[in-house]
Image (spheres, rainbow, N blue to C red):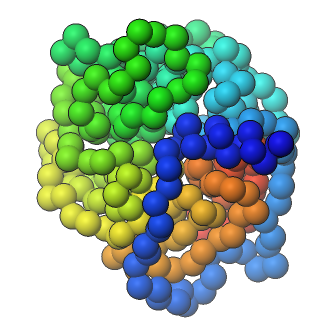
Amino acid sequence: MRTQLKLVFLLACVGWMQPVVVCAQQAPAKSLIADNAKLKLVADDYKFTEGPAVDRQGNVFFTDQPNDRILKWSADGKIETWLTPCGRCNGLFFEPHGNLIGCADEQNQLWSFAPDKSHTVLLDGIDGKRFNGPNDVWVDADGTLYFTDPYYKRPYWDREVMEAQVPKRVYRLASDGKTLTVAAESFKQPNGIVGDAANRILYVADIGDNKTYRFRINGDGELIDRQLFCEMGSDGMTLDVLGNVYLTGRGVTVFDHDGHKLQEIDVPENWTANVCFGGQERKTLFITASDSVYTLEMNVQGL
């Protein structure tokens, strides 16, 4: 029964999965995983974990979306509930001033949480229409927000209109906190998103089409030069300092900057939703997977 419940919520969160096709494999010169390191189960008493985001101290905040709460994993390994309720947040990311940005799926909004846990609704739609359901978010160094807006019908929605209201897109909220524009479109189901602020690159996964794209961010914050990065979608993603891209789904799959597959990290769960680097040295890979969270010590730091 427990497995069946997990599967039901998984399908509600990410839709019916299509077979994954990955890029050609290329063996890394050295394993990205630390010597003798093993995947460590940290906790498994959740319903569905998502949205890990690291703060400046290396603490990781993540969500247990069905239970409507944000939890905090301290760099010393302890976990505590940080806030509940939280608008049923999904993806999270810290902006430069220390506020936590959350994709608040209950009312299809984008929230900003202050350190005192108060929140502000940043956005709730475009052109008078409700968002489909902001899913994942990345914040540039100047505070510009980029977020994906796929459509997954949620069992907890209580509204008359249950279908998608706008096309499935990536949006950009300028650093002024007011100017909202369509950053990219023509996706089947945009989901994971992550950027490299120094090199002006943004990655967007179209999980519905089993593809991940790479964009350049120009001086105005616009996304240009859309390129296919690899033929694998992703629920969530992160980067390391070498420019490697970590995609999720059936475990964690790592690609180098050119889209060559480097390494696979097996995770013993039905679904791996998201991933980030945490810990004081940013060398702990923190993985949210179904009803559990795991850590793995790495040879490389997170970006």
Q: Is residue 177 left or right of residue 116?
A: left
Q: Considering depth in this image, is 217 or 16 the residue closer to the camera?
A: 16
Q: Is residue 27 left or right of residue 212?
A: right
Q: Is residue 102 left or right of residue 286?
A: left
Q: Position of residue 77 (x, y in %)?
A: 83, 45
Residue 163, placed above or below residue 217:
above
Q: What residue appears at the point 26 percent right and 66 percent down from the top-left corner?
A: 228
Q: What residue appears at the point 41 percent right and 53 percent down from the top-left corner?
A: 207
Residue 39 visible at all: yes
Q: Position of residue 164 (x, y in %)?
A: 33, 27
Residue 78, placed above or below residue 20:
above
Residue 243 visible at all: no
Q: What residue appears at the point 31 percent right and 67 percent down from the top-left corner?
A: 229
Total label count? 0
Residue 214, placed above or below residue 263:
above
Q: Position of residue 179 (x, y in %)?
A: 20, 21
Quarter of the image with the N terminus is top right
Q: What residue appears at the point 59 percent right and 19 percent down from the top-left corner?
A: 156
Q: Considering depth in this image, is 86 or 302 the residue closer to the camera?
A: 86
Q: Position of residue 193 (x, y in %)?
A: 40, 47
Q: Considering depth in this image, is 242 or 260 the residue closer to the camera?
A: 260
